[in-house]
Amino acid sequence: MGTTGFWIVLLCTFTITSTSLGASSNNRDISAKYVSGDNPDEAEGFEFLQTYDKRASQECYLSVLSNWAYATNLTEENKQNLLERSLVYAEFQKEAWKNATSFAWKQFKNPSTRRLFKFLSILGTAALPTEKLKELNEISASMEDTYSTSKICPYSLQVVITDESENLDDDKSSSEEENCTLSLEPDITRILKKSQNYDELAYVWKAWRDSSGKKIRKRYERFVELSNDAARLNGFADMGEMWRESYESDTFLEDLENLWKQLLPLYENLHAYVRRKLISKYGNDKIRPDGPIPAHLLGNMWAQDWAGVQEFTEPYPGKPSLDVTPQMVEQNMTALDMFNISEEFFSSLGLKEMPPPFWEHSVIEKPTDREIVCHASAWDFCNGKDYRIKQCTDITMQDLITVHHEMGHIEYYLQYADQPSLFREGANPGFHEAVGDVLALSVSTPKHLKAISLLNEIADDPEGDINYLYSIALDKISFLPFGYLMDLWRWGIFSGNTSVEEMNTKWWELRLKYQGVCPPVKRTEEDFDPGAKYHIPGNTPYIRYFVSFVIQFQFHKALCEAAGHEGPLYKCDIYQSKEAGKLLSQVLQLGSSKPWTEAMKIMTGGKTNKMDAAPIIEYFDPLIQWLKEQNKNYTLGWTSNDPTICP
């Protein structure tokens, strides 16, 4: 249904009278939650929403445009333009909030109208006084700038660029800094994936944290204070509570813990198997058989993805490799080729193709003439026409999956483009993250990779199946505890349950408890290791990814059933299934116009409206049984007396 059609449906319930964005002079308490006024005129409220929708799209476009300009060219001029535009957008939001909360919207009859006003009644960080908002925006921009421009020296030089560099001999310091040019993407990422030198990996791991997270600690402390001020002005106890509100569930925290408990046995078995393989490689003087895994040995800066250890931990060596990176390189595949492959998968389901502005304006390779925020992201410019991806694409299978993930966001934007601007969001944040990933579950099947000429032969036997499931587990299962603990840590900071004096220690306590990993070098409160992950300085809530990694398997199961798949869930490829595409489109088009539980009910054909770990357990069942057998005489779990250093 188009935007016009949506408004016509609402219009049928009442008569229109005139209003405008500037009509209110209310002085209500901004610190209450879901503020409502005393104007009972639903028709007037409806016209206000129409007026708001047009202007909101215009203001949002200008705001996103300034964000894009800065993210794709990190200059001081672009940063200042971004900060100025942020303040203008905040003034618009305040004006809209004052008008929206003049209506007694909680009494309105139309549920969609009430939902739109409910969304509008949360002002967000724009609730802050101008000076505090300006400070918050400046801190946010500076933290992201520090992260995105951080560099380290090669292992051979073993010197990290620090703030103390000016104390060194000028000639020596200058010479060293000229060589300290390794950025996270692609340089450091490649080292972590390819090197098997224990000391080099430990050096790179520490150097990145010294160069990025450590430098922003003080700024982050102030950022938390200002964020909480904003949350309280919106009627929430702290920013963590405000973030969780988007899941519209009184049992959200309890639900998350229950999901984790369901998935813990699978993670523990994977952890025990990988730990044993790492001991064989690096020695039991580096890793205890009942201890945590050193975080720098898992092929990823944050130990959230263990694909980097697949080559020497694979259950059945000698089978055809499931990492198609060599074939991609051999075929001289480009970043554009990878994006075309992804779009073709979406279109094969009958979903929408990327519009011309996407191809004209997206940045899909790392520029050589300027600094940019390399962290991959998808952008909606709020005008129903302009959608873009920013990604420093490397020619790897992992980045091919990332392309599908980001294009999944764009597809979601396209599908709900006709909703009012306030409903142009995912059913919940996890839904948005799951869309591209659920298609990647099909893309990564050996059958599909062979069909698109990226795999020459497949091992269609039980051993080949275990290798395949293991490769997926190194991506999906290894991530789960990290996806969970990131915001457990942040919520603790926001709520005050974790003091700023113990921020780093608490981080490692959670990483030990949930992930079973430990730092290779001693960590103290002089460090700020959470800040070495983009989503902390970038202020992106993270629990959405944990939710996504659960519900994408629910989506996969439902779409496979729609496609008529028969056989094990892990062998399903929904490629070219218009029925699967129709079901997915039906859910995506809703945006956030309905609670996510209703969207889940549609996706699952009425079977459930809840998050459910059963499909992910079903998907990995053959691997689960295999791992249990392999680990029969070995320790599951881990112990350590000090989370801030590997035992």
Image (cartoon, rainbow, N blue to C red):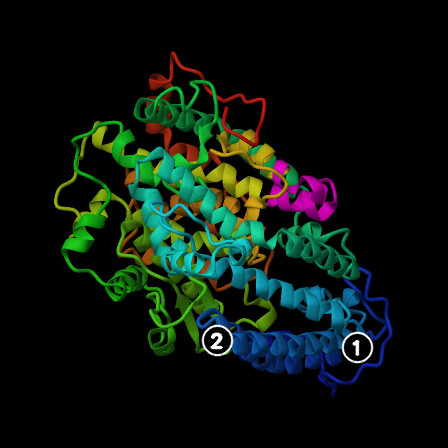
Answer above or below: position of 109 versus 573.
below
Answer above or below: position of 48 versus 249.
below
Looking at the rendering, which quadrant does residue 584 occupy? Answer: bottom left
| Residue drawn at point x = 73 percent, y = 59 percent | 226
| Residue drawn at point x = 32 percent, y = 35 percent | 197
Residue 16, numbered circle: none
* Label 1 neighbour load within 10 Å: few <14, some 14-19, many 20+: some
Task: Based on the picture, tell me whether residue 62 belongs to the magenta stretch.
Answer: no
Q: Residue furthest left?
A: 456
Looking at the rendering, which quadrant does residue 76 occupy? Answer: bottom right
Q: Which residue is mark 1?
A: 41
Q: Which residue is mark 2?
A: 69
Q: Secondary structure at mark 1?
A: loop
Residue flagged by tag 1: what amino acid is it?
Asp
| Residue drawn at point x = 78 percent, y = 85 percent | 23
Q: Main secondary structure of the magenta part?
A: helix
Residue 110 visible within the image: no
Q: Nearer the viewer, mark 1 or mark 2?
A: 2
Which one is nearer the viewer's eye here, 156 or 364? 156
Q: CA distance from mark 1 to mark 2?
A: 42 Å
If you read the primary sequence from the N terminus, does the residue marked by circle 1 or circle 2 appear first? 1
Residue flagged by tag 2: what amino acid is it?
Ala
| Span shown in magenta | 487-505
Residue 465 visible within the image: yes
User: Could you say where residue 502 lies in the image, as x and y percent from the top left?
Assistant: 68, 39
User: Could you say where residue 318 lies in the image, as x and y percent from the top left?
Assistant: 16, 31
User: Could you say where residue 269 lies in the image, as x and y percent from the top left?
Assistant: 42, 24
